[in-house]
Amino acid sequence: MNELKASPAAVFAHRHLLGIEGLLPAEIIALLDLAEEAVEVSRQVEKKKAVLRGRTQINLFFEASTRTQSSFELAGKRLGADVMNMSVGSSSVKKGETLIDTAMTLNAMNPDILVVRHHAAGAVHLLAQKVGCSVINAGDGAHEHPTQALLDALTIRRHKGPIHDLTVAICGDILHSRVARSNIMLLNALGARVRCIGPSTLLPKGLDRLGVEIFTDMRKGLKDVDIVMMLRLQRERMDGSFVPSVREYFHFFGLDAEKLAYARPGALVMHPGPMNRGVEIDSAIADGPQSLIRDQVEMGVAVRMAVLEALAQNLPNG
Amino acid sequence: MNPDRLKNNERPLVLANARVIDPSRKLDARGSVILADGMIVAAGPEADSAAVPDGAEIVDCRGAAVMPGLIDMRVFIGEPGGEHRETFASAGQSAAAGGVTTVIMMPDTDPVIDDVALVDFIARRTRDTALVNVMPMAAVTKGLKGREMTEFGLLQDAGAVGFTDGRHSITNALVLRRALTYARDFGALIMHHPADPDLTGSGVMNEGETATRLGLSGIPKEAEIIMLERDIRLAALTRGRYHAAQISCAESLEIIRRAKKAGLAVSCGVSATHLALNELDIGPYRTFFRLSPPLRSEDDRQAMIEGVADGSIDVIVSSHDPQDVDTKRHPFAEAADGAVGLETLLAATLRLVNNGDVDLLTVARALSTRPAELLGLPGGRLTPGAPADIILVDPAMPWICDGEKLRSRSKNTPFEGARFEGRVLRTIVAGRTVYAYAGD
């Protein structure tokens, strides 16, 4: 596949970004190209652009997040938008207000872009049907987290070149991971070979139908891969419900130097954060020369700027 | 009591030039149906030459089908306790428009139908407010809690037509064993919803590729299969009368077939929704398609149709479950299960007939005759002396379902905008016309 340089934002003709599923390869590449420019902007002293001047962006987070929320906030501000953060968390929900009530309330404030994270799969779709502005999915349950997949792709592309030649292993709790789903969709769309590695209790039924190779042995799964993507395993899933214990999990699925040695020389390690050091990843690897974890954070801002800019082109009067 | 219902001062009625469908005697033939005094006087080709009662209204059916009114064995009604979702009056109107002349009501109300006084209340209240017959099934266990048996004998005397814990599964095998054993003394039917709550877990749709793509947790078919298999063993042990309220997958059908072959008093139902739709219809998280049991794969749907065609599946139900926006307008995983279905039960089922999968007689049997047999009701047949609970149907008339026009108080239909063929033209309960089609 040729990663053609098309005029970036023009290729992306969507009102919302709800997921990677359904995006064309050319659209993904256009967003990544636009993000490259945003990286340059973000590295200048003058980091401001004006594409969102006068626009209102609301970050509506029903689930706590530091990294994604601040990344979207910074991205919006660098493009000149007025950014408001709403951590709904529990307050309104406890008062009995439904997701849709909250959305309608915010909609009445005439935002241009709504960035939404919610703990239920499909919640962002539901919201997008009810509001008049553009909606960006910042993570919905175990469904999708499209900007994470885009920033991962950008990070990979900047270090390894075109994605279609690469073998990528996604390791850990695939069952509960929206990051895994979005990455599977994106990497497959761009022609990479995708592997999923984890204990069978954390691999969803029908995963094989998503175009991935499945491994339950990390050493076999990591053999000759170019990229190792680690996923976070939540502590409450390590108490015997999905895996017996932290130490058993780390023994078989924690990424350490010994296991990483099975990957191709120069293989790179990624993690969407926040990390559980000593659970899914050894500290020495996380901070080591093969780690791209800090790059991912920088690319996160750039990719979110690109997404905001692409959607801004399609806003009314935009 | 409603004096109109008591007096039954309706004129006798002759439905002439009709396609008379009576599954109780495998009759599908041109003929007439004569009704008088709330009962069927004659039906079939022989009725053409029978004497027309004095003062009878004569209707030329122009070849439309006359069949027994539908007996819907699984209907949830909001009243009492959830009148904002559905009342006896609104459920009755909805049923009448859908050709359902007898509604078998589930005990999942507030309070639960587990006491004689409640059965009594429902009998009186529905006589006053509902257009069609409403008969309650009482709870198997007090408060639907799955522990102590209710008073089967007294409840049956009061008018409960069977026993079920509705949406709830009885996880304790000993409780179900005793219930099946004790119910046998009264000849009562135990209807059960086989769904293992532990295996169901946090699942909200059929487990598999579609659920994985949507990021929703899945309900394995085994949640149904394992509990159904257990239930069948208990039916064999107790020789009690067991009815699986709804099955949803091919493996369950095999279990039922095996049990029937072994001569057990086992029967089962399927919902018209599961005959018409599969898991892919959920599409972008449409909560009106969130059901229990969940919509399964296309292979399972095809198996359900086969089961209806060969009679392994006894009855087709609507599983009518009105839910309001307060329970449905949520993200899929947080929404309630259930869909309304009284008004679409017949039309959705007729898809099977119009596709050539099943003949009209077989479908009519699963919708009326078989439920009547299982529950010991006098209806579900067009024989002299049977109650005049009948419907006039144009099996080919096309129409489009408009959720807002449904008579139910709740509009949670999975058939919004669906194209149907087959429409109820007239619904008659005890000789009285309770619905007449008057254009869309």
Image (tube, rainbow, N blue to C red):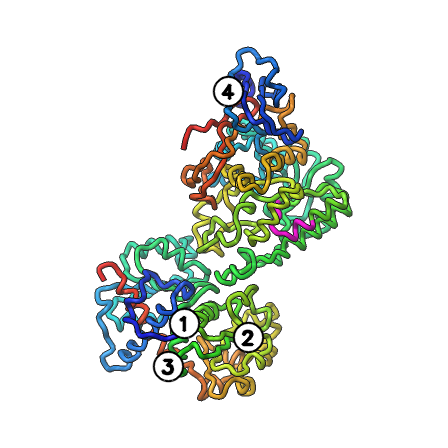
State the residue position of label 3: A158
Mark 2 residue type:
Ile
Q: Is residue B78 visible?
A: no
Query: Which stretch appears magenta?
Result: B246-255
Cα–Cα span, label 3 and label 2:
25 Å
Q: Are marks 1 and 2 in contact (CB under 8 Å)?
A: no
Say the numbered circle drawn on residue B435: none
- Position of residue B131 in the picture relative to residue A94 (left or right): right
Secondary structure mostly seen in the magenta stretch: helix
Q: Is residue B250 magenta?
A: yes
Image quadrant for the C terminus of chain B? top left
CA–CA distance in space, label 1 to label 2:
19 Å
Q: Which of pointers 4 and 1 indicates the residue nearer the eye?
A: 4
Sequence order check, earlier mark of 1 and 2: 1
Under circle 1, the secondary element is: helix
The earlier-in-sequence mark between 3 and 2 is: 3
Across and down, in percent, residue A138 comes to 39, 66
Q: How many marks?
A: 4
Q: Chain of mark 2?
A: A
Query: Are the residues tagged 4 and 1 within 8 Å (C-beta)?
Result: no
Image quadrant assignment for residue A115: bottom left
Residue A110, x across and y down, in percent: 27, 57
Tell me the element at label 4. strand
Find disc 2 in the rendering and name its residue: A197
Provide the residue designation for mark 1.
A148
> In the image, what residue type sits under mark 1?
Gln
Kind of element beneath mark 3: helix
